[in-house]
Amino acid sequence: MGLFDKIKGFIGDPEDEDDFEEEQEENMDFVSKATETPEQFAADNAKRSNKVVNIHATAQLQVVLVKPERFEDASAVADHLNAKRTVVLNLESANKDVARRILDFLSGVAYANDGQIKKVANCTYIITPYNVGIMGDLLDELENNGLYSNTASEDALLRARVEDAVRLCEIRSCPRFVGFLDERQQTVARAVLHHCRGVPFLFWGGYEDAERTLLGLFPSFQEPEPAGFPLLALGFSYRRDVGLTHRDFLGTLLSLGVKRETVGDIVCGPGLAVAYVQEELAAHFAASVEKVGGEGVKVLFPYEGELPGGREFEERRDTVASPRLDAVLKVMIGSSREEAARRIAAGLVSVNHAPCLSASAAVKEGDRVSVRGEGRFLVDALGPPTRKGRLFITVKKYR
């Protein structure tokens, strides 16, 4: 089993933050001596920055995975750090007090070696020697290989938000709303709601088949209805010969200092775009936006007209040997099957909004496949078989 395969299963599901982690996080962004002069500190930083290793450029970078349970295990971890090895430290198996002691001890070892320590998930840290850049090549490489991601932590936070909204809805007997949520987040929320039986809920994004939606939770005596959702549509009119895109509008709205969850779908067409936003920020957006992508726009608020155009697809047809994910992905992205398998193993592919690391996973009609850097696809038709036993397949790429 390769190094990256070992790391994939190493960073466990996040749990609620422990107090000791919060205390450590305040002191770990790291590592300057209290007695250093500014000149010494600058010199140390220069030394480190001049020796940052590009992870692609060396075959000697060693990454060690450790999961200590007792404080006595910390000495072995310290030996790895003294040997200039990068350590991925998972403390989820240690109790709170032991974990604090281990982290304090290893922070000191890293400090003595001019190293760095960074929290990358709940109970999980990466400790590097002085010659490895913790925020550059190392984390980029881990993330590109599907080994490190903030997704697990984000999902844990979302689960907590949904559970809290359910609780408040039941206590106060009034609707509660979460989001906007993308399709993956909706899947996470549905899993939480599956265990909260009897709670009426509805996902609504302003129109049928919206991709980003608010989650509405309602008291048992109230029927979920779209009319009660706190969202509004903003229209933006502009010259028809100007090719403004979804990215242009999203960038403009987010540049106003709001979070991504405040903006839902943005539907663009010739001369008109419609954005769904949280109701409390709609007036702020309407008053603040005058230009998008350098082009003047007129804000239509509130917008109550038709959506521009319709959803467009690029259709691709081919045959596959089997409904395996790597075979289907080959058709979708126009690559070799080996390249498709590599992207799956690297954690770049999601099926029905959930990451999939198995090249042999079966795909069926109606499945939605997302590929980082390539876009989103729909398996529109699979079959019938050809005379040679292959399968006809039709996939559609969202434009």
Image (tube, grey):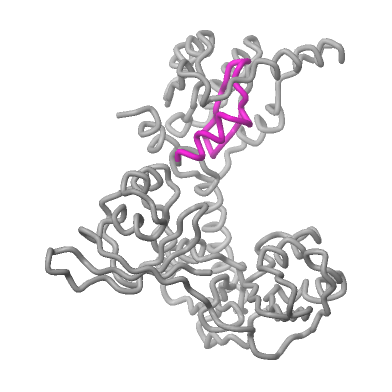
| Percent position of residue 241, x then y | 74, 77
**Quarter placement of the N terminus:** top left
Per the rendered image, the range of residues in magenta is: 118-145
Quarter of the image for residue 11 reads: top left
User: Which residue: 45% across, 67% down?
Assistant: 397
111 relative position to 124: left or right: right
Q: Nearer the viewer, residue 395 or 355?
A: 395
Q: Nearer the viewer, residue 215 or 276?
A: 276
User: Which residue: 62% across, 72% down?
Assistant: 265
User: Which residue: 45% across, 41% down?
Assistant: 146
**218 shown above or below 375:** below
Quarter of the image for residue 247 reads: bottom right
User: Which residue: 63% across, 17% down?
Assistant: 115
**77 shown above or below 204:** above
| Percent position of residue 153, x then y | 54, 47
215 relative position to 41: left or right: left
**326 shown above or below 187:** above
**323 shown above or below 11:** below
> Residue most toward the bottom?
305
Q: Is residue 224 magenta?
A: no
Q: Is residue 123 magenta?
A: yes
| Percent position of residue 95, x then y | 47, 30
191 relative position to 288: left or right: left
